[in-house]
Each structure stands twice: as C-alpha cells, then as structure tokens.
C-alpha cells in the first residue's frame, strides 16, 4: 500500500493518478474525497455534520483495510488532519505493508492552487498544514511545489523496492499504540 498524506491541494490525487501509470502491478486508487462525494447532496444539519464526516472517514479506513486484506495493491489519498484518523489507520492497516508518503507543498502554492480550483474554502490547506504532518514520520517525502506529479510517482516507484524496515507505520504504531499483540482484531496480513 502506498499511503499519500498531505493537505488539500498538495497534489496527492495527481501523484496517485501517475502512480497508477508507472507502477508495474495493478493498483487501486482509493481517495478519501471519493467517499465524501458518494454522500447524498442533501444538506446536513450543522450539529450533525461532524458525526457524518467522522463516520465517512471511519468507513473509508475500513474499506481501505478490506481491499488490502484480500491482497489488492492500494494507493491511498488521505488528509490525516486529526490525530484520531492516524490512530485509526495505524490500528486497522498492516503496518509492514504500508509505504507512508508525506506530500508537501509551499503555503504560497497551496493558496494559488485553492484559488485556481475554486472548489475548496480559501485557506483550508493552510489550516491543515501543521496538523497533517504533526506526527513527523514518513518513509519518503515529496514536495510538489516544484516537482511534477510524474516525478514524485517515479521517485516513489524507485523507492518501493528499498522501503525501510521497520516502516514508518510500524514505528508510529509502536510509538502511539504500543506493542502490537500477535493477533489484533481488524488487522490484516
């Protein structure tokens, strides 16, 4: 699994699209935005929105884990903007099978991209910036300020055969969740 984490507009989806072209084996791109897009377009009461969003993220994590559990290669496109999201992924995913990729972009470029897209609240990426990378541990990092999505995808592809052991997910799981028992419910080989 290639797990791309970065702010909104950082370039995760563009890198994922390129990865599907450059990786040798078949991969599925599972973006969190697709799960949000599947939700009804009806207005959600402001008091209910947070619960609806949290259930969406929890379901997304379990869908990713389910796809991986039966042997699918996955490119995950996510915004780990709250600590519980990272903790949930650490608990659900087999950490030795996750290549954790930090996708960075300068604040100036994020603002430019948000404005050009026009489909995100202004300043969303800037508000996410500190929280998304707060855990500080990745296997590999890309900066899309100057590197193209194709360059980032090629770099990730070249890195996959020499991924570290323990992986960033293994180190983070030990650090944040403690030692893993031999068999954890919800974890897949």
Image: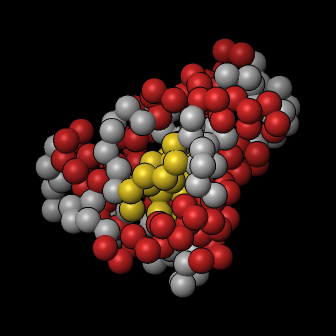
Identify which residue is drawn at 71% across, 51% down: 34
- Outermost residue on the bottom side: it is 24
At which x and y percent is residue 91? 33, 49
Residue 99 shown left or right of residue 175 in the figure: right
Identify which residue is drawn at 21% across, 65% down: 165
Residue 95 shown left or right of residue 71 in the figure: left
Asked whether residue 91 appears in the rendered view, the answer is yes
Q: Quadrant of residue 120?
A: top right
At which x and y percent is residue 175? 19, 41
Pick the residue in front: 63 or 136.
136
Residue 33 shown left or right of residue 84 in the figure: right
Pick the residue in front: 172 or 110.
110
Identify which residue is drawn at 59% across, 77% down: 22
Q: Quadrant of residue 125?
A: top right
Instruction: Name above or below for residue 101 compared with residue 42.
Output: below
Q: Please state the total of marks drawn on the protein image.
A: 0
Residue 122 shown left or right of residue 162 in the figure: right
Which quarter of the rendering shows the C terminus?
A: bottom left
At which x and y percent is residue 23? 55, 78
Q: Quadrant of residue 178?
A: top left
- Outermost residue on the front side: it is 146
Pick the residue in front: 136 or 49.
136
Q: What colour scheme has been applied to the protein in the rendered image?
A: secondary structure
At which x and y percent is residue 102? 45, 48
Identify which residue is drawn at 83% across, 26% down: 43
Which quarter of the rendering shows the N terminus?
A: bottom left
Asked whether residue 187 appears in the rendered view, the answer is no
């Amino acid at each position: 699994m290639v797990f791309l984490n970065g702010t909104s507009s950082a370039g995760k989806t563009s890198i994922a699209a390129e990865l599907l072209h450059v990786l040798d084996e078949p991969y599925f791109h599972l973006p969190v935005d697709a799960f949000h897009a599947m939700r009804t377009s009806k207005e959600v009461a402001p008091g209910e929105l947070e619960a609806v969003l949290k259930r969406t993220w929890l379901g997304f994590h379990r869908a990713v884990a389910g796809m991986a559990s039966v042997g699918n290669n996955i490119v995950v496109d996510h915004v780990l903007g709250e600590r519980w999201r990272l903790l949930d992924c650490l608990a659900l995913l087999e950490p030795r099978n996750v290549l954790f990729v930090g996708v960075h972009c300068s604040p100036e470029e994020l603002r430019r991209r948000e404005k050009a897209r026009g489909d995100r609240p202004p300043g969303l990426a800037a508000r996410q910036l500190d929280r998304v990378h707060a855990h500080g541990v990745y296997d590999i990092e890309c900066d899309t300020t100057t590197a193209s999505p194709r360059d980032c995808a090629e770099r990730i592809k070249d890195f996959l055969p020499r991924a570290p052991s323990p992986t960033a997910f293994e180190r983070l799981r030990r650090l944040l969740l403690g030692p893993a028992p031999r068999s954890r419910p919800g974890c897949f080989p």
